[in-house]
Image: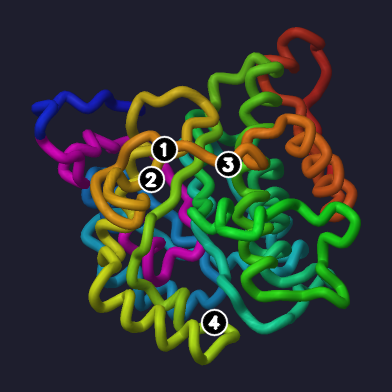
Amino acid sequence: MATKHSADRNSKWNASDIGDQRGRTAVVTGANSGLGIATVDALARAGAHVVLAVRDPERGEAAARTVNGSVEVRRLDLADLASVREFAASWRGELDLLINNAGVMNIPEAGTKDGFEMQFGTNHLGHFALTNLLLPHLTDRVVTVSSGAHKMPGTPRIHFENLNLTGEYSPVVAYSQSKLANLLFTLELQSRLAAAGSSVRALAAHPGWAATGLQSRDASVLRRALMAVGNRFVAQDNKAGALPTLYAATQDLPGASYVGPDGFGEMRGAPTLVGRSAAASDPVSAVRLWAASEELTGVTFPRLESEQRQSGTPQTVSV
């Protein structure tokens, strides 16, 4: 249920403006800490039933116990496509909201269980597969968490000739590529949903600079030190950082909208619609990335209910 913000124009949107979410079910990936648990808590307090999709169920259960509302924990490892398929195959009934929140940032070079570069594989490919496999159940929207890093200096791009950055890995380049991929994914997903006549919307959000555990895993000791200082003196806390995601998840916004903080440099502040780079707005790259992602994951865009009614054919999902 999308709600329009009705507060005074001079007020700043916050979690109390979410609106009644009773009767809605949401899945939040990477939900046991940071932005994820803040998102879960806000939605649950507003009345939604929220599934914490986490790699470590024990940590997920500990996080769930801190939430005031209806929640459950299910295992999901986005760096393992078998786990993604298992999670999606176990879903029964409708799903109102999918929040693709989980991610890794600027980590040392590593690979997923399927052999993909870890940041691209987790931040983009895992969510790409999860979203397409769950789409037949979705009734409202998909929100994917990107980052201002998608337009960092150095002109981030999708390295189509070497998506795994084999032989040229850089933690920052890999992270920027994955966050650019999140936006191109949202762009093409919205295009496909609209073409299918679906009412489901795809949106994206970024938290600005939010103090979470994400920065502590940086491959660079120097960057870790700088980020620790920034976390203390510049960053928002995780609750403020989750507001753009919550705004995208609950307000009446057009498909493909991108939400971020309204402050200087989009580092902090209240949620608002923000711009993206030219590279993140390129429909040709979005289509090319989608095709590459289908080939890598073996997961394709499903036939949705509106298409079923028109064609009379059964709904299928390619895995």
Can you tell which of label 1 and label 3 is closer to the viewer? Answer: 3
Discs 2, 3 touching: Cβ within 8 Å: no
Mark 1 → mark 2, Cα distance in angstroms:
6 Å
Seen at 41% across and 88% down, the residue is 225
Identify the residue under disc 3.
Answer: 277
- Return the disc, 4 or 3, that comes first in the chain's sequence: 4
Residue topped by disc 1: 274
The alpha-carbon separation of the residues under discs 1 and 4 comes to 26 Å
Q: Amino acid at mark 3?
A: Ser
Q: CA distance from mark 2 to mark 4?
A: 23 Å
Q: Is residue 309 magenta?
A: no
Q: Helix, strand or loop at disc 3?
A: loop
Of the two numbered discs 2 and 4 on the same chain, state the one appearing first in sequence: 4
Q: In the rendering, which numbered label is found on residue 218?
A: 4
Q: Is residue 107 left or right of residue 115?
A: left
Q: Residue lying furthest top in this view? A: 310
The one of 309 and 6 positioned closer to us in this rendering: 6
- For numbered disc 1, what is the local secondary structure? loop
Which segment did they paint magenta? 11-39
Q: From the viewer's side, name the closer residue of 157 and 76.
A: 157
CB atoms of marks 1 and 2 within 8 Å: yes
Q: Is residue 130 left or right of residue 1?
A: right
Q: Which residue is mark 2?
A: 260
Query: Nearest the camera: 302 or 207?
Result: 207
- Amino acid carrying label 4: it is Asp
88 left or right of 36?
right
